[in-house]
Amino acid sequence: MHAVDTNIVVRYLMNDDAVQAGRARQFVDEADIFVPATVILETEWILRSVYRLSPNAVGRAIRQFIGLPTAHQEQPAAVAQALDWFEQGMDFADALHLATAQNCTGLATFDRDFIKAATRLGLATVAEP
């Protein structure tokens, strides 16, 4: 199994470079791949910032990719939860931080926007130290 970098995922999803997209599709479709959570984090940022996709479109694209039969991901439950919170308005990086810390008693931050988003979603475990 090979791990993939963000550019493989983005080429696969966006088909924005015919040669690289074709190579990415062939590689991903023919072999089992490992998708690190950090690659999903970067992919979200690129799809939102560079391609200007909405949170729902970003969520659909990432779910499509990690749902491929050849894709194996790091922390699938945490990524799925983070995508849900992201689609409900939380910053994806913050959502992923929180989702991967679910076994902790809370998450300390000085980021007031993160605290507000978490509180709005009923996640009172995010607070200032």
Image: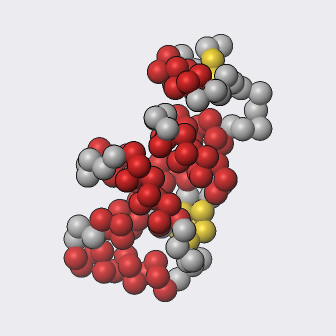
Residue pictured at 40% horizontal, 84% vertical? 26
Residue pictured at 23% horizontal, 67% vertical? 16
Quadrant the C terminus occupies: top right
Say how the picture is coloured: secondary structure
Residue pictured at 36% horizontal, 66% vertical? 13
> How many labels, in total?
0
Quadrant the N terminus occupies: bottom right
Apparent side of residue 124 relative to residue 3 in the rendered image (left or right): right
Q: Residue furthest top?
A: 129
- Picture quadrant where residue 27 is located: bottom left
| Above or below: residue 11 compared with residue 100 | below
Apparent side of residue 63 relative to residue 23 in the rendered image (left or right): right
- Looking at the picture, how far across and down is residue 107, in whole percent? 66, 26
| Above or below: residue 79 compared with residue 127 | below
* Camera-side residue of 129 and 52: 52
Residue 125 appears in the picture as rendered: yes
- Looking at the picture, how far across and down is residue 112, in whole percent? 50, 16
- Looking at the picture, how far across and down is residue 52, in whole percent? 26, 47
| Above or below: residue 121 compared with residue 71 | above
Residue pictured at 62% horizontal, 35% vertical? 98
- Picture quadrant where residue 18 is located: bottom left
